[in-house]
Image: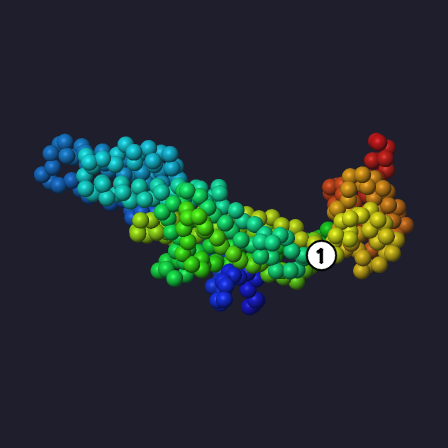
Amino acid sequence: MHRRSALALLLPLAACVTYEVPDETLLAGGLPLPAAVAVPLPSSGATAEERAIHAWYGSVVGQMQDALLARDLPLLEDLLARHRGAAAPEWAKEQIELFARGARVLAFELHAAEAAVLEADGGTVPLGAIQRCVLHLHGDAGTGIRVLGAEGRAPARFLVAVTISDHDWLGDHTERRFSHVLTLPRSQEPGSPDGLSLAFAVDGLTPEGCLRRSSITVDLLPGVVVLEGREVPNRRVRLGALELTSYPENVEVVRRDPLANLVAGLRLADPRHFDNVFLAAHFMADEQREAALEELIRHLRVGRADVGRLCMACLRVMTGVELSVDDRLGWLRWWESRASTR
């Protein structure tokens, strides 16, 4: 079934460059490395010394490949420092230079995983509104590296994965997941003063509750970057993760005085205000907690069935007790047990 795109790359004065891929077809993190190590056979007329040198550098190149596969940058740099010399055969020099470039890209990947920042552009928006996000990456580890944009032969692609969990006044939640692959709009250099940035927007989707928790991650997908005019493979890297909590637009009224809103909402017993009661429990200040618990228990004892379920949902939020919102007797026993031990 077709559904509208829920995430788009923001391009000033241009159409969006975005497409959605089913989860099962997403790239899982392949390892595009320098071309497979090809150690030529020594010539038939090679001397014993030449054969020994050949075998030695075959081992060295193999160790470099293992270090790169393991993302062990210190080991790879140590191997390069010890073996980038004139004694190496020509075939080994070529392979070692490939791994020297691979080491620089690995340093960039490791730096990016630590230094990239994903943030809500302009702050968190109200529940159901479009959430704009931006990824920033700066740092010397990217010096000399250019990440290709849409104008390049092999533009960089980023996987943006979103999980949206909406919670209603009963504490139940509905979870929706979607993911998109975004293309970098223009080539950028992470090591430059401007660094690298990727802006995108997440659709608010129709709310299915009064509280939303959103989880957003951005991964650089396997591809190539340009280093000293050469395309060098890069691997998948988690660049950023962002956790956001969104509320309805009127939430500040509830946040200013949670206890007053909880008391008023319970007394009105109007389902139109149940969301506010639940949010009041969510925001309840420590100094108001006991009064709020007493109010909830009182309405649980004498209120309508729907008000009782609301009270039990609020009790769960405030206490962390894992009792059902249908277990009225269980909650009353919990309250009596709690009172007897205080």
Q: Nearer the viewer, residue 177 or 184?
A: 184
| Residue at point 41%, 51% (across, down) | 189
Q: Quadrant of the N terminus?
A: bottom right
| Residue at point 37%, 60% (across, down) | 152
Whole-percent x, y for residue 151 in the image: 38, 62
Q: Which residue, as the protein is rendered here, is positioned at the far left?
A: 45
Whole-percent x, y for residue 242 in the image: 57, 48
| Residue at point 29%, 33% (across, down) | 81
Location of residue 268 by image quarter: bottom right
Whole-percent x, y for residue 4 in the image: 57, 66
Q: Disc 1 residue type?
A: Pro
Relative height, residue 82 to residue 194 (above, below): above
**Residue holding disc 1:** 248
Q: Is residue 117 visible?
A: yes
Q: Is residue 76 left or right of residue 318?
A: left
Q: Nearer the viewer, residue 14 or 177?
A: 14
Q: Is residue 263 left or right of residue 247?
A: right
Q: Quadrant of the C terminus?
A: top right
Secondary element type, mark 1 = loop
